[in-house]
């Protein structure tokens, strides 16, 4: 009897401790100077999303134009915006905690969110609370932004822009549509001004069709591999058309491994390089099964976008940084929550969602008058410019023909010599070709990218 009582007490203590630890609903903190604010929002029972806002020290006072706010959405799915986008790409500090001269704070305030739940510092208390689709993620993000705007930080008076990278582009377009519905219903006050899709996974079919021809033209694969690549892309396309999205994801994984083998390990983030020689990707961790970032999916391996090994913007160990000094600084991260600890589960739950296109959602945004910008790095393979141009041609938007007939304008940057890119705009659709950049455009070409951000947001920042 005494042993049973002891076990019961132990169980009660454990449950109480767990409830205390995960009893975070909506809480936030500020830095001493007020330039940073962060916190958790409970978007659903047992589902907690982490956000981090930076107010720009470069804000122009008494400017004729209002100062914008940018929401950054990372890809993966499962890549952490508060980690990768913040410390490795566009935030105020790099992964060595040294100031970044090209921070996007020069043009806007920055809001990072670990999206979907289970990503970064965001967490769920049970498996049933993971998001399973882009629309699930959009619903959660809409809840978060509604609570933030209404209760925590004032987003009502700022021009609000969504910038996304990689799979984050799919999150961005579904979120934008969800926000528009909520705004029109009177549930949310937000001045949504535009969506920017950076090297975004909007049409998996078009991207996979681009790999074989592109790599063959670059002499990276031979004619036989080119032919097989086209066959594999057709098989993926067939599965997508049949709605067999999970099968398409597994075929995509096999296709990527085929490309790696036949190209002698081309870097999917920069086709001018070998994967092992890419200075942007960390080689401190082993790469399983010849893939960029392997995760197990029902007994199969898939490579998804390799954020675990991705390490631009400094040589610091991001995982150690986020689970050490940053976690200590933030003070509100539950002790048992490890940064990125649930990211593999995020990927698993998106297996059947991963290959779904979102071209129709882009069309809907354009039809509703939302400014849509697409920007792409010249040497990206995974989300190639060739593939992006292909899916743009599938838009039903009535301004498409005029857009395609509009001349491109060359881009330059300060005192730097040479053409840095091209741009084309018509009505509310804009496209930027960024030369010399791979998948991670802000890292590879920070100067012209920062100028692009200023032009998109009409920032009064210098």
Image (cartoon, helix red, strand yellow):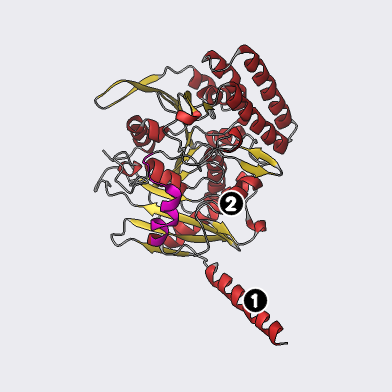
Residue under pointer 1: 11
30 or 281: nearer the viewer: 281
165 or 258: nearer the viewer: 258
**Percent of width and height locating residue 67:** 33, 46
Say whether marks 2 and 1 touch (CB < 8 Å): no
As drawn, is 131 to the left or to the right of 61? right
Mark 2 vs mark 1, CA separation in Å: 35 Å
Quadrant in the picture for the C terminus = top left
Looking at the magenta stretch, what is its main secondary structure?
Answer: helix
Q: Quadrant of residue 352?
A: top right
How many circles with numbers are drawn on the protein?
2
**Percent of width and height locating residue 69:** 39, 47
Measured along the vertical axis of the image, is residue 62 above or below residue 233? below
Measured along the vertical axis of the image, is residue 15 above or below residue 37? below
User: Residue 97, which numbered label?
Assistant: none
Q: Would residue 136 be seen by someone viewing this image from the given angle?
A: yes
Q: Residues within 10 Å of mark 2 (few under 14, many from 20)?
A: some
Residue in the image at 67% along x and 43% along y: 297
Q: Residues within 10 Å of mark 1 (few under 14, many from 20)?
A: few
As drawn, is 221 to the left or to the right of 449? right
Residue under pointer 2: 139
Q: Secondary structure at mark 1?
A: helix
85 or 182: nearer the viewer: 85
Residues in magenta? Answer: 313-328
Query: Is residue 322 on the magenta stretch?
Result: yes
**Percent of width and height locating residue 299:** 71, 43
Query: Is residue 132 on the magenta stretch?
Result: no
**Which of the two marks, 2 or 1, is nearer to us in this view?**
1
330 or 160: nearer the viewer: 330
Q: Secondary structure at mark 2?
A: helix
């Amino acid at each position: 009897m005494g042993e049973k009582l002891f076990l019961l007490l132990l169980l009660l203590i454990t449950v109480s401790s767990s409830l205390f630890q995960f009893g975070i609903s909506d809480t936030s903190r500020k830095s001493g100077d007020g330039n940073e604010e962060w916190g958790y929002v409970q978007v659903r029972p047992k589902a907690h999303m982490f956000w981090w806002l930076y107010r720009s020290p470069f804000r122009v006072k008494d400017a004729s134009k209002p100062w914008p706010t940018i929401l950054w959405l990372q890809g993966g799915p499962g890549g952490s915006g508060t980690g990768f986008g913040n410390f490795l790409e566009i935030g105020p500090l790099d992964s060595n905690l040294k100031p970044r001269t090209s921070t996007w704070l020069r043009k806007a305030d920055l809001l990072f969110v670990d999206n979907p739940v289970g990503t970064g510092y965001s967490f769920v208390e049970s498996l049933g609370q993971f998001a399973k689709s882009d629309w699930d993620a959009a619903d959660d993000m809409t809840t978060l932004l509604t609570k933030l705007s209404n209760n925590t930080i004032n987003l009502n008076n700022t021009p609000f822009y969504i910038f996304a990278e990689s799979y984050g582009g799919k999150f961005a377009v579904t979120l934008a549509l969800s926000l528009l519905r909520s705004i029109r219903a009177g549930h949310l006050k937000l001045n949504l001004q535009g969506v920017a899709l950076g090297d975004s996974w909007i049409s998996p079919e078009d991207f996979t069709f681009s790999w074989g021809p592109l790599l063959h033209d670059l002499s990276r694969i031979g004619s036989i591999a080119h032919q097989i690549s086209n066959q594999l892309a057709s098989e993926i396309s067939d599965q997508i058309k049949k709605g067999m999205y999970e099968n398409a994801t597994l075929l995509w994984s096999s296709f990527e491994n085929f490309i790696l083998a036949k190209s002698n390990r081309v870097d999917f983030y920069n086709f001018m390089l070998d994967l092992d020689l890419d200075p942007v990707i960390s080689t401190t961790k082993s790469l399983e099964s010849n893939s960029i970032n392997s995760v197990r999916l029902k007994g199969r391996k898939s490579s998804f976008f390799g954020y675990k090994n991705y390490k631009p913007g400094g040589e610091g160990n991001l995982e150690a940084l986020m689970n050490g000094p940053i976690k200590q600084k933030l003070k509100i991260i539950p002790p048992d929550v490890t940064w990125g600890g649930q990211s593999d589960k995020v990927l698993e739950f998106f297996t059947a969602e991963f290959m779904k296109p979102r071209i129709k959602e882009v069309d809907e945004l354009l039809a509703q008058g939302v400014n849509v910008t697409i920007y792409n790095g010249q040497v990206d393979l995974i989300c190639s410019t060739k593939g992006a141009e292909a899916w743009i041609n599938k838009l039903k938007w009535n301004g498409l023909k005029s857009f395609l007939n509009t001349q491109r304008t060359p881009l330059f940057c300060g005192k730097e010599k040479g053409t840095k890119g091209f741009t084309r705009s018509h009505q509310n659709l804009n496209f930027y070709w960024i030369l010399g950049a791979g998948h991670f455009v802000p890292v590879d070409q920070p100067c012209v990218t920062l100028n692009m951000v200023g032009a998109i947001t009409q920032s009064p920042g210098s």
